[in-house]
Image: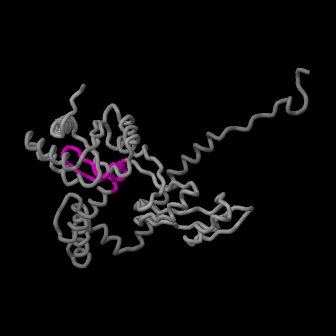
Amino acid sequence: MAVKPSKADKKIAYDAKLCQLLDEYTQILIAAADNVGSNQLQNIRKGLRGDSIVLMGKNTMMKRSVRMHAEKTGNQAFLNLIPLLQGNVGLIFTKGDLKEVSEEVAKYKVGAPARVGLVAPIDVVVPPGNTGLDPSQTSFFQVLNIPTKINKGTVEIITPVELIKKGEKVGSSEAALLAKLGIRPFSYGLIVLSVYDNGSVFSPEVLDLTEDDLIEKFATGVSMVTALSLAISYPTLSAAPHMFINAYKNVLAVAITTEYSFPQADKVKEYLADPSKFAVAVAATTVASDAGAAPASAAAEEKKPEPEEESDDDMGFSLFD
């Protein structure tokens, strides 16, 4: 007969397992496991099998094991996990792509009925239509102020009704009505709350960022740095071109209003002295563009296929008849 392990033995085994996983893995997903059943959790483990391991446990045990491992190895980065171990959470250790693992975990959601006293995670809206219930069931709808009518001997809901709002507790009447209608409004599964990667902790929303998002955010940051640099007259790599152009404009303004001049200002002064030269420059530009377009149009005309000659057959007779 096998000897049943004591609580102390179980704690030692759990500590050893968690410390081993911390040694092997550098990427961890912290996931909420509220209302997740054992069968559902088993399916998630099967789906992640290969490069990921799901570990559940009491928060106090997980925190103690993390502290022990940090003290033993001297790796204080793991201590960043401790503030995240709040509520009913589990750890998903993975060597795969964090985004792909997070998406795989999200697939295993199971529909659940609205139980009395449960806090609604989403808004519950009852759609209009025939309920299939007989007229004697109208009391449920009257209690909840749901407009109905009798159609072909059954109760029909006239308009969509927001039965439960997000964050509210499910009442007995709401739960009974949803059960009669066969509506399972909630779905539960592991929900990734935080991501740990080599000592860094960040929100799972970061995993959804694409290269275009990163480029856009980088460009926004560069613009802000440039604007700040120009405002305080502090030279930076992004602001330098604007500073040179602004300085040139200032020097040019001085040259125009005074007798001082320099090569880059001479042409501007020449245009200001004789505005008709503006028209000459524009005309020259137009002629140049037209000259470039003319060969292209001519080449297009040359490439236009010639119409094929009509054959004798098309005219109604053939030379070989």
Look at the picture and state if 245 lies above or below 41.
below
Q: Nearer the viewer, residue 188 or 256?
A: 188
Render colour scheme: one colour
Q: Quadrant of the C terminus?
A: top right
Report the side of 107 relative to 218 (left or right). Answer: right
Q: Which residues are magenta?
A: 190-216
Seen from this angle, which residue lies furthest bottom? Answer: 257
Q: Quadrant of the N terminus?
A: top left
Q: Nearer the viewer, residue 13 or 227?
A: 13
Q: Quadrant of residue 86?
A: bottom left
Residue name at image x 37 percent, y 42 percent: 38
Membership of 194 in magenta stretch: yes
Q: Quadrant of residue 245?
A: bottom left
> What x and y, as percent, mark residue 144?
55, 70
Q: Nearer the viewer, residue 313 or 241?
A: 241
Look at the picture and state if 222 lies above or below 38.
below
Membership of 136 in magenta stretch: no
> What x and y, as percent, mark residue 20?
18, 35
Seen from this angle, which residue lies furthest top? Answer: 320
Residue name at image x 42 percent, y 50 percent: 188
> What x and y, as percent, mark residue 295?
54, 47
Q: Nearer the viewer, residue 48 or 151?
A: 151
Q: Quadrant of residue 169?
A: bottom left
Residue name at image x 23 percent, y 59 percent: 238
Task: Count all numbered tags in the image, as a single digit.
Answer: 0
Look at the picture and state if 238 lies above or below 262.
above
- Residue 209 visible in rendering: no
Report the side of 271 relative to 27 (left or right). Answer: right
- Residue 315 visible in rendering: yes
Residue name at image x 86 percent, y 29 percent: 313
